[in-house]
Amino acid sequence: MVVNPSVPAKTVPEFIAYAKVNAGKLTMASGGNGSPAHVSGEMFKMMTGVNMVHVPYRGAAPAVTDLLAGQVQVMFDPIVSSIEHIKAGKLRALAVTSATRSELLPDIPVVGEFVPGYEATGWQGIGAPRNTPTDIIKKLNREVSAALVDSKIRARLASLGATPFANSPADFGTFIVEYTEKWAKVIRTANIKAE
């Protein structure tokens, strides 16, 4: 969660208070309708009761450009695309949207410290066709899990702002179902429509 330095809020609680005083006046950039930045911001709005105007762009790069220029005030941007701007003082990070602090920005709190239950993260996983034999699934899971504990792989993923997690195929299936239900609720509540 990054803001243009012209926004006076230095913390998530200060931002919530500022947004409530300026209801409907703050703009929230995203890389487009239904993008991760958009739904992350909509969940924040839903859980805090703030009213911000969503400004969808045709991609994250123009959204960040306008955030830097002060044309919009806030964005729920992936760390890797905003970290250099944060370090240079061109953007202010208020929080990260993961459940735990980021290794890239260890001094920045998580939104969930101020908005209980808030977590907005992306993920990548490995799947196989439906009829793949169980022994092959188990072998793939074992090999991927072993790779995710390798220190070189973990360091590379951390440099990209990623936190690896390995689990069983059944747990991964449960995760996908829960993740889909969580974001479907946000999409329905925010009335997000495909363009």
Image (cartoon, rainbow, N blue to C red):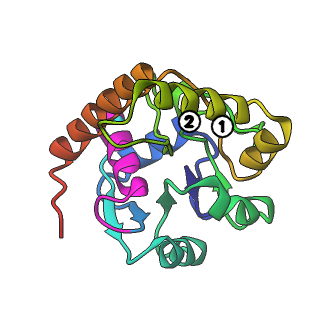
- Toward the viewer: 179 or 22? 179
Q: Is residue 22 left or right of residue 163?
A: left
Badge number at residue 98: 2
Q: Nearer the viewer, mark 2 or mark 1?
A: 1
> Dividing the picture into quarters, in which one does residue 2 lie?
bottom right
Image quadrant occupied by the C terminus: bottom left
Residue at the farthest right position: 152
> Dividing the picture into quarters, in which one does residue 64 lie?
bottom right
- Residue 66's place in the image compared with 3, above or below, is below
- Please provide the residue range marked out in magenta: 32-47
Q: Tag 1 or tag 2, which sits nearer the N-term? A: 2
Q: Is residue 67 magenta?
A: no
Q: Is residue 65 left or right of residue 107?
A: left
Q: Is residue 182 left or right of residue 26?
A: left
Q: Position of residue 164 (x, y in %)?
A: 64, 35
Do we see residue 174 in this rendering? yes
Q: Are marks 2 and 1 in contact (CB under 8 Å)?
A: yes
Tell me the residue at 29%/36% (across/down).
180
Tell me the residue that label 1 is attached to.
163
- Residue 32's place in the image compared with 174, above or below, is below
Task: Measure the alpha-carbon separation of dots 2 and 1.
Answer: 10 Å
Secondary structure found at label 1: loop
Tell me the residue at 77%/39% (across/down).
154
